[in-house]
Structure formats: structure tokens, C-alpha cells
Image (cartoon, rainbow, N blue to C red):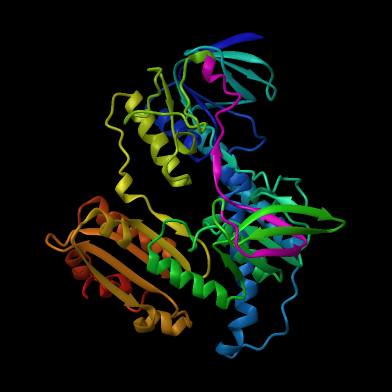
């Protein structure tokens, strides 16, 4: 094993946190290398997560529109026929194009990409094995951006065929007749939407009494109603206690109890179980102990406000450090971390991190929820505008949604925005901008919005 050049920074991981950090480091004039073990750049997000999921969500939404909406617009077609192989091929082409773009981006910014598995030998040396061949590289600074992997439940161990993670659920070779989704978070709801649209009978099981994690309660309740109307079945306050594969089906045992208290026992038969109950950091196998880097009891790497670990020249970002496990958060942290290394004022505003659920309609939010404001004793006011009053929504036949703005009762400063609407993922950008720069709801209300557009609903909610 030979030692190669010394770098200003070596970044481990080429996902959204790693490749964005690498490109920014190159722009700042650093000598930078990015080590990644996958065949294609982009990490889990581009290859096995966000991007393939959105490709299938868009394809399956076309199926749903053809089935349910065409005739309302005077368009007569037969029952849509699904060619799942073509759909998957399209998804793979989207992945290929985007991962190629990442490679082009890094090359344009003079980033050396090293293929292989990285392990820290010390605070300044990294051993890379496999891929391009075994080698050791030296670095003044190291940035850890290795991401996360799906959590496996003891009651539902992955077998890759009958009991699967989201990665396998993005590559099914046929539509399952019956799919059980364990977990009603963002990923679970999106995968439930994809396969329900394509013909699966989908049941979502969730331990909590609500869906979509910590979103605003009003949004959670409305989204639940919408998804139920799309023929997705929900079993809330229910947990899986065991499962057995029998020939080509899975018998899943559940209970309506919580904690040690068991209620009604339920038996559910399906062809496939998707486990989507969260993710855990990929901190094992990195050699963190050899470099003296601390990890907590859950495998996360603690960092300070400048993304430094307890070892001064080793930084960490993204899913590895916890918080909201979102690709755009990781990118923002990666960019900020290398700017700090370069002596600049890198910063991430955690009060303005958008979250999006890519169901149909989409749900998006930024800032605090109404429940959080009540718990914190903050005086606030609410402006809510239903899409039934939106001209654009009426024209599209997409009126089942709303915009909700929470602002400080005295200062009128925007504290939170919550949206259910088609393209809510795009609409939320205006709200992120408003919170980032301390805008008031009056400011949003005075901004001229195009007519007719969905974004007008933001203006209307602000003026209430």
C-alpha cells in the first residue's frame, strides 16, 4: 500500500453532503479528494433514495391521473397498462444522468475522486481499499459525510425479497398484490403512494396516532384523509410484533397496544413488507476509534457549531451527525464546513430547513408547527387559505389542500409555513426565504404574485 499526495481536505462520502462540500472546496482553491465506495457518485440519495423515489412517484402519478382525472377533462382513454420494466429503465436513466452530472461537477472543480472504502488510520491519514486499488492518503482536514442506512426491526429482519427496505422497494420487478408498509413517515408515505397507484393493495402500519412524523397537526390530519381517499389503508397506534414468510406470502402479527401493553391482536397476510421506520448513521467501519473521534450511544458523531468533532481537524455533516435526515440539510452543512475550513463564515440556519413529502398533493413545511408554538408559549396568529379558493387549483381540479402561515402575534414575523398543494415542494421556497430574512406575513401579503398560480395561496393566507 503506497501513500499518495497530501490534500487540504479529504471528504469521505460522495452523497449530497460530500459532493457539494467537495465542489465548494475546489471553488475555494483547496486541493481536495473525495473518497466513495459506490460505483456511481451521488450516494444513497441519487442512487437508492431521493432521486429514484421521485422518478417513480412522477411515473406513477401519470398512471393515477390517467385513471382518475382524464375523463373529467373530456379525455377518453382505456385502462392504462403498466410496463414496469420501462418505468424502471426510465428511473435508472434519470439516476445515470444525474450521477454523471455529479462526476462532471467534481471534475470541473478539480476534485480528485478516489474509489474505494475509507478507514481512518489517524487524524491525518486515511486508508482506502478496493475500488481504484489500495492506497493511503494524507489530509490536513477530513470531512466525514457517510450518510445513513435503513433501520432494521427485530420483528421484521430484512431478507431482501419478502421483507425489504426502501432500496429494494425502488426496484421491484413486479407490482406486489398486497404491500404492508411499516412506518408512516415521509418515505413510507411516498412508497405507499407509488405502489398503490400502480395497483398494489397497500396497508400502512404506524405506532403513533398520526402520520408524517412531526409535521403540523392540521397538515397530518388532512394528508391522512387525502391518502385514505386514494385507497391506502392505515392502521395507527399499531405495532408489528412478528412476521413469518410462508411460501410466497408473509404473515404479519400486530397489536394495537403500545409499549408493554398489548391490545387487539391482528394478523395480516401480504406478499411484501416494506420497513420504513427511520435510518441510522453509517459510522461503523470508519476507523473513528483509531483517530480518537467520539461517537454517541446511537452511533452519531457529535460536532460543535462549526461541524468539528472532538478531533480539531476532523469534521462531520449530514445524517452522520443527526438532526433532520434530509439531503439538502447535508448539502448545506457540507458547504458550510469547508467554508469554515477556509476561514470563511460558513453557517446553516436550522430554523429555515424545508421538509417535503412527495405524495399527491405534496406536503411541505418550514419553521415551527402550531403544536410547537403552543408548547413554547409563543403568542402567534394563524392565516389559513384553502385551495378551494384558488383559481389555479380550480382549473386543475386540485382543490384538496391549503396554505397555513403562522406568525408572531406582536411582530408579525413569519414563524412557520405549512402547505398541502400540487408543487408544494416548489412553493415552500418563498416561505424559506421569508423565514431566513425575518419577513412578516404582511411582507408576503404585499408581494405581487402571478395570477392564477398556486403561489397566490401564500399571499391569500398572509392577508387573512
Q: Quadrant of residue 88?
A: bottom right
Name which residue lies at 26% across and 50% down.
436
Outermost residue toward the bottom in this view = 74
| In the image: residue 133, left or right of residue 263 | right
| In the image: residue 17, left or right of residue 150 | left
**Quadrant of the image containing the C terminus:** bottom left
| In the image: residue 98, left or right of residue 419 | right
Name which residue lies at 21% across and 70% down.
445
The picture places residue 238, in percent across and down from the top left corner, at 58, 61
The picture places residue 17, in percent across and down from the top left corner, at 47, 37
Relative to 45, residue 91 above or below: below
Name which residue lies at 26% across and 54% down.
435
Residue 138 showing in the rendered view: no
| In the image: residue 269, left or right of residue 120 | right
Asked whether 38 or 24 is in front, the reply is 38
Q: In which quarter of the image is residue 151?
A: top right
Q: Does the magenta stretch include residue 275?
A: yes
Asked whether 387 or 242 is in front, the reply is 242
| Magenta stretch in the rendered image | 261-289
**Quadrant of the image containing the N terminus:** top right
Q: Is residue 85 magenta?
A: no
Asked whether 103 or 423 is in front, the reply is 423
Amino acid at each position: 500500500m503506497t501513500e499518495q499526495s497530501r490534500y487540504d481536505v479529504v471528504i469521505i462520502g460522495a452523497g449530497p453532503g460530500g459532493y457539494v462540500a467537495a465542489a465548494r472546496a475546489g471553488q475555494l482553491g483547496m486541493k481536495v479528494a473525495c473518497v466513495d465506495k459506490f460505483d456511481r457518485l451521488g450516494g444513497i440519495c441519487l442512487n437508492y433514495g431521493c432521486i429514484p423515489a421521485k422518478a417513480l412517484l412522477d411515473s406513477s402519478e401519470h398512471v393515477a391521473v390517467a385513471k382518475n382525472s382524464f375523463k373529467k377533462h373530456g379525455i377518453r382513454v382505456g385502462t392504462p397498462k403498466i410496463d414496469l420494466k420501462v418505468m424502471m429503465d426510465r428511473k435508472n436513466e434519470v439516476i445515470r444522468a444525474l450521477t454523471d452530472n455529479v462526476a462532471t461537477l467534481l471534475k470541473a472543480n478539480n476534485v480528485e475522486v478516489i474509489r474505494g472504502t475509507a478507514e481512518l488510520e489517524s487524524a491525518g491519514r486515511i486508508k482506502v481499499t478496493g475500488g481504484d486499488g489500495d492506497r493511503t492518503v494524507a489530509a490536513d482536514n477530513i470531512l466525514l459525510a457517510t450518510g445513513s442506512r435503513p433501520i432494521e426491526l427485530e420483528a421484521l429482519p430484512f431478507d431482501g425479497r419478502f421483507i425489504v427496505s426502501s432500496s429494494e422497494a425502488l426496484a421491484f420487478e413486479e407490482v406486489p398484490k398486497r404491500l404492508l408498509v411499516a412506518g408512516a413517515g415521509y418515505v413510507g408515505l411516498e412508497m405507499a403512494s407509488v405502489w398503490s397507484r400502480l395497483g398494489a393493495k397497500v396497508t400502512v402500519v404506524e405506532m403513533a396516532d398520526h402520520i408524517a412524523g412531526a409535521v403540523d397537526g392540521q397538515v397530518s390530519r388532512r394528508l391522512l384523509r387525502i391518502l385514505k381517499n386514494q385507497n391506502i389503508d392505515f392502521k395507527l397506534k399499531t405495532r408489528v410484533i412478528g412476521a413469518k414468510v410462508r411460501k410466497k406470502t408473509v404473515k404479519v402479527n400486530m397489536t394495537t397496544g403500545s409499549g408493554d401493553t398489548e391490545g387487539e391482536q391482528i394478523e395480516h397476510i401480504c406478499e411484501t413488507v416494506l420497513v420504513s421506520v427511520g435510518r441510522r448513521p453509517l459510522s461503523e467501519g470508519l476507523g473513528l476509534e483509531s483517530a480518537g473521534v467520539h461517537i454517541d450511544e446511537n452511533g452519531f458523531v457529535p460536532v460543535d457549531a462549526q461541524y468539528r468533532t472532538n478531533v480539531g481537524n476532523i469534521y462531520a455533516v449530514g445524517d452522520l451527525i443527526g438532526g433532520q435526515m434530509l439531503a439538502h440539510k447535508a448539502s448545506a452543512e457540507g458547504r458550510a464546513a469547508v467554508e469554515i475550513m477556509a476561514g470563511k463564515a460558513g453557517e446553516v440556519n436550522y430554523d429555515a430547513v424545508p421538509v417535503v413529502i412527495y405524495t399527491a398533493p405534496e406536503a411541505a413545511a418550514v419553521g415551527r408547527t402550531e403544536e410547537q408554538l403552543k408548547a413554547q408559549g409563543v403568542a402567534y396568529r394563524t392565516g389559513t387559505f384553502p385551495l378551494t379558493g384558488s383559481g389555479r387549483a380550480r382549473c386543475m381540479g386540485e382543490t384538496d389542500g391549503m396554505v397555513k402561515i403562522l406568525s408572531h402575534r406582536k411582530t408579525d414575523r413569519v414563524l412557520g409555513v405549512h402547505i398541502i398543494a400540487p408543487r408544494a415542494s416548489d412553493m415552500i421556497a418563498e416561505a424559506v426565504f421569508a423565514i431566513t430574512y425575518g419577513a412578516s406575513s404582511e411582507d408576503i401579503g404585499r408581494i405581487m404574485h402571478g395570477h392564477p398560480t398556486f403561489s397566490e395561496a401564500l399571499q391569500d393566507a398572509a392577508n387573512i
